[in-house]
Image (spheres, coloured by chain):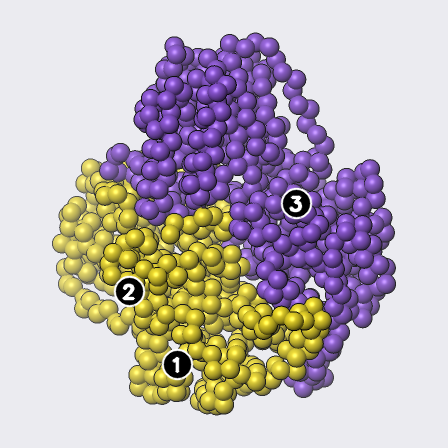
Chain colours: A yellow, B purple
Amino acid sequence: MRIALAQLNYHVGNFPQNSARIIDAIGKAKLEGADLVVFSELSVCGYYPNDLLERLEFIRESLAAIEKIAAICDGIAALVGGPSINPSPKGKMLFNSAFFLQDGAIKSIHSKTLLPTYDVFDEYRHFESNKEFNLIELKGCRIAVTICEDLWFNQKVMNSFGRENLYATSPMEENCRQYPDLVINLSASPFSYHQERLRKDILVENAVKYKVPIIYVNQVGAQTELIFDGGSVMVDKHGKVVKELAYFIEDFAVVDTSDQELNEIQPLTETSDRIYQALVLGISDYFRKSGFRKATLGLSGGIDSALTLVLAVRALGAENVKVLLMPSQYSSDHSVNDAVTLANKLGIDYETIPIHGITNEFEKSLASIFRGLPADLTEENIQARVRGSLLMAFSNKFGCIVLNTSNKSEAAVGYGTLYGDMNGGLSVLGDLYKTEVYQLSRFINKYEEIIPENTILKPPSAELRPDQKDSDSLPDYELLDAILFQYIDQARSVQDLIESGFEEAVVRKVVSLVNQNEYKRFQAPPTLRVSSKAFGFGRKMPIVARYPL
Amino acid sequence: MRIALAQLNYHVGNFPQNSARIIDAIGKAKLEGADLVVFSELSVCGYYPNDLLERLEFIRESLAAIEKIAAICDGIAALVGGPSINPSPKGKMLFNSAFFLQDGAIKSIHSKTLLPTYDVFDEYRHFESNKEFNLIELKGCRIAVTICEDLWFNQKVMNSFGRENLYATSPMEENCRQYPDLVINLSASPFSYHQERLRKDILVENAVKYKVPIIYVNQVGAQTELIFDGGSVMVDKHGKVVKELAYFIEDFAVVDTSDQELNEIQPLTETSDRIYQALVLGISDYFRKSGFRKATLGLSGGIDSALTLVLAVRALGAENVKVLLMPSQYSSDHSVNDAVTLANKLGIDYETIPIHGITNEFEKSLASIFRGLPADLTEENIQARVRGSLLMAFSNKFGCIVLNTSNKSEAAVGYGTLYGDMNGGLSVLGDLYKTEVYQLSRFINKYEEIIPENTILKPPSAELRPDQKDSDSLPDYELLDAILFQYIDQARSVQDLIESGFEEAVVRKVVSLVNQNEYKRFQAPPTLRVSSKAFGFGRKMPIVARYPL
C-alpha cells in the first residue's frame, strides 16, 4: 500500500487556508498513486486552539471543513485531525480525533487516549480521553490510528517518587491486541533540543516492542511560543527508519509499506544549528500568522540584541528590520561602534536616539519628590523604560512589532526592567541561557564574522551606570546558568544543589531571585520555546507564595 | 457528634504559618468539646500551589507538616487537605487528598475524584483522579469525605451540544452506596458573583437527593487572582441550612450533627456589596502575602482610578496609599479638581507631576524620525507610557506596588496602552465592565459622597487629545458591555449576537477588537476575579490565530 505523509504548516482557526492546503496535498497524493494520505494532529483547525475549543462556532466550522475535505476523497483515503463531538452525554464535550475519510464521507473517527496535561500541554482542559480502539481496514491492511501522546505511554517521568508510568492505559497495548499491520500516528510534537532523540527513540521502541511498522506525521511551523519541527518518519517493524521527512519546512513523501529499502537517516545536526532554525521559523511564523512584516528592536552593542537582530534579519529580510540605537551617558563608545558595525554588516537601517534629554526630564520632574534620596535602581529603570517607550513609539508609528532581546538567565533572576527592556511582542532568546546565547552567536560566526567579535568577547554589561558589569550583581554566567538549569529545568531542590557541590550562599541567592521574580515573568512577552522547560505557560508558578528554599 | 468547621486564610507554601493556624484551631475545637475538626481543601499547603506541586521538596514539606499536625490530634480527630502520593506506580504522582488524623497519626486518606480542569482550574495537570470510596467511622457515625468538585457532578455545562454531565463518575453516588450518616466536603471555591447561589443550591440538591447532611468547609482569603469567600455551611438531610459561617473573613464554629434547630440563614447582600468585600480582601491579601504594605496609582479624576483608590484605602489604610496626579495639556481642570477632592476626602497624600515636559522631550527626540507624519495613537501612547514610567519610578523608589486601574471593558477591546496605563502589579477592576464600575461607585456613595459626583456623572474620557471622549471610538458602554458579556462570558457567537438583535456592524467591530487584543492581555497584570469568566489564566486564547467572526 502506498501512503503519503503530508507535513504541513497550519494556522490556528484558519479553516479556509488549512483546508486548501490539505485538499491540495490530497490531490498531489492521488497523482502519485497513494492509497492513503496522512495529516497531523488537529490539522484542520491547527494545533493548539486553546479555549477556542470552547466556542461552538469554532467546532462547527471545523466539522464543516472536514465534511468538505471528505467530499473530495474519491479514489483515495485520508486521515485528518480535528475535534469531534463526544457521543456520550457524560464527560467532556470533545475528543481530539483523527477522521478517516473515504469515498466522499467520514468513515470512522479514532480518538486520542493519552491527553498530555503538563508543561505546555493542556489537553484535558478540552478533551475527554478515548477508551475505544478500532482498526481501519484499507486494501487488506489493518491500521491502528493513534494520536501523538498515545505512543508516549512509556515516557520517563522526571522527579516523581519512582513512578513507572504517567498514564494507566497503554493505547498501543490496546490496539496491538487486534494485531494491526501498521500503526499510524498523527502528531503535533513541538521542538525542544532536549527531546529530539527521545522522540525517535520512542517510535523505535514501540515498533520493536509491538513488531509493527509506524508512520508518524508531525506538523511544522510555529504557533506563538511553540515551534513544530516536522521530521515525520516511517519506521519498519524492526525499528529501522524507512523514510524521514525534512525538519523545519513543509514536506511531502509517499512511502510504500512493503518497501524494505532503507533511506539514509539524516544525521542530527549540531544543537546550535537546530536552535537557529527553530528560532528563525518561530519569528517568521509569528509575523506571518499575525499579519505583520516589520520588526524593530533596540541594538545596544551587547550580545543579546546582536543575536536577536541576526535571527530577525534571517527570518524577515533586512528590508523589514529597523533598529534603534539609544545611547545614554553610560554607553561606551565600543557599544555604539559594535552596534553600527553589525547594522552595516547586515545592511539594515538604524536610527540613533540619545536618551539623556528624556531621562534628564524624568529626573527633573521627580526631583522634588525624590529630594535627599540616593540614586538607586529607580534611575537605571528609568533609562530602560525610556528605551522601551521609544521602541514602542517607533513600532506604533510604523506598524512593526518590537522584538524582545532578553535571555533566559535574565528572565530567571529578574535582571531586566518591567515595561523597559522586558517590552516586546515576542521574546526571541527568552528560552536560551546566557551561555547558550554565546554558543549560538559563535555558531552564527562559524564561517564569517557576522556578530562583531568584540560583542562576543567583552564582559556583559547593562550599561545603566558607570562601569557596570553583570558580574557586579550576579555570579558568572557559567555558574549561574548551571544552577538555574538544575533548579528550573530539572526541578532539583536547593538541598540537592548544595549537596551536589554548589556553594550554599550562591544557590540560595540565585533561587531566591528566581522565586521573587515570578511577578515580572507573569507580564513578560510570549517566549519562543526551544528547551523542555521554558518560562511561559509551560511553567505555572504562583506569584504570591512562600517558595521552598 | 460535635464537629468544628475551621474556615481559615492560608498562604501557599507557607507550611509553618498554615500549620500553626491549623494547630491553633484544633486546640480551640478541643476546648469546645468537638470530636472532629474540618479544614478546607489543600489547607496545609494553601490552594492553589500550581507547579510547586511538581517539586519534591514541596511535597515532602507538606507531608511533614501533616505528620506534625497529626501528632497533636489526641482526643480529637481532624480532616486536613494536602497532596498525597499515588500508591500505584501508574498515573500521575499525586492525589488531592483529605488526611484523616486521629490518635496522633494519619488514619486514612480520602482523595478527590472530580478534578476541575477548566476556567481557572488546572487540577488534572497535577493530580490523578481517585477511584476508591471508603467511609470513616467516628463515634458510630459513618462519614463520607469528598473534596470540592466531587459535589459538582450535576453542574450545568454551558455551551456544549446538550451535554448532561461533565464527568463520567459521580462520587456522591459511589459514596452513598455505603449509606453514610454524613458527608463532609473540604473545599476551595473561589468567589464569583455569578455563582454564589449556585454553590448553596448544589449543596442542598445533594443533601436532598441522597438524604444525608453535608458539612462544607471553604477557605477564605485571596490567592493573587482568586478570592475565596468562606461561607462554610452545614445543611441537614432535608437541605435546610443548620449553620452558616461568615463571608470574606476567617470564622470558626462547632455544630452538633444531631442538632435540628435551624439558624437564621444569612440573606444574600446586594451584588455590589459582595464585590466590594471581595476586592478589598483581594487587595489586602495580595499585599500582605507578598510582604508589601504600600500602594500607589495614578489618579486621573476619572471613575476607574477613583474607585480603585477607594478600594485600596479600605484595604491598606490611607497612610499606605499615595497617588500621583499627572496632568497633561489635555487634562481638564475638573479632572484635576475631582482628583484632589477625592484625595482630600480620603485623607491621602498626593503628588502632582505635570507630564508635558517629558512628553515634549520624547516628541523632540523622535521629531526627525517622525518628520512629515501626522500625530496619531503614537503620541497618545507616549503620554500613557510617561505616566506608567513615573508610577513605576515612584514605586521603585519608595517600595510600593502600582495598582492598575483598567476595567474589563477596556481590557476587552484593547482601549489601553501596553506599558502605559496597563502597568501595575495587580489589576483591581479588570474583571468589572465599565457599567459595573459605575454600579460599584454608586454603592460606595450610597450613604455619603465619597467619590465626587462629577466623576460619576461626566462622560468618560482618556483625555489624551483635545475634547476626546471614549464614545468617539467605542459604542456607549451599556451597549458595549452587553455585547462583551455575551461574547466573552457566555461564549455566544457573532451569529447568535446578531440574531438576538444587536446591529451587525457593531457586533463585528467589537468582536474583532476583542480578538485583536489577545497580545495585550497576555502581558496584563494579574486581575482580581469576581465573575465566572475573567481575563487571565481562566481564559486561554491563542495570540496568533484567525478567530471566528
Which chain letter goes with mark 3? Answer: B
Comparing labels 3 and 1, the label whose residue is closer to the camera: 3
Residue A245's disc is 2
Q: Position of residue A225 (x, y in %)?
A: 44, 61
Question: Marks 3/2: CA distance?
Answer: 60 Å
Question: Marks 3/1: CA distance?
Answer: 46 Å
Q: Which residue is mark 3?
A: B315
Q: Residue at x 24, y 69 (%)?
A: A268
Q: Which residue is mark 1?
A: A459
Q: Nearer the viewer, residue A165 or B336?
A: B336
Q: Which amino acid lies under the numbered mark 1 shown in the image of this protein?
A: Pro
Vertical comparison of A251 with B236: above or below: below
Residues at discs 1 and 2 in contact (Cβ within 8 Å): no
Q: Residue at x 77, y 41 (%)?
A: B444
Q: Looking at this rendering, what residue extends furthest in the front direction? A: A372
**Is residue A139 visible to us here?**
no
Q: Position of residue B346 (x, y in %)?
A: 77, 49
Q: Nearer the viewer, residue B5 or A251?
A: B5
Question: Marks 1/2: CA distance?
Answer: 42 Å
Q: Residue at x 65, y 47 (%)?
A: B316
* Residues packed near mark 1 inside 10 Å, few (<14), some (14 to 19) or many (20 plus): few
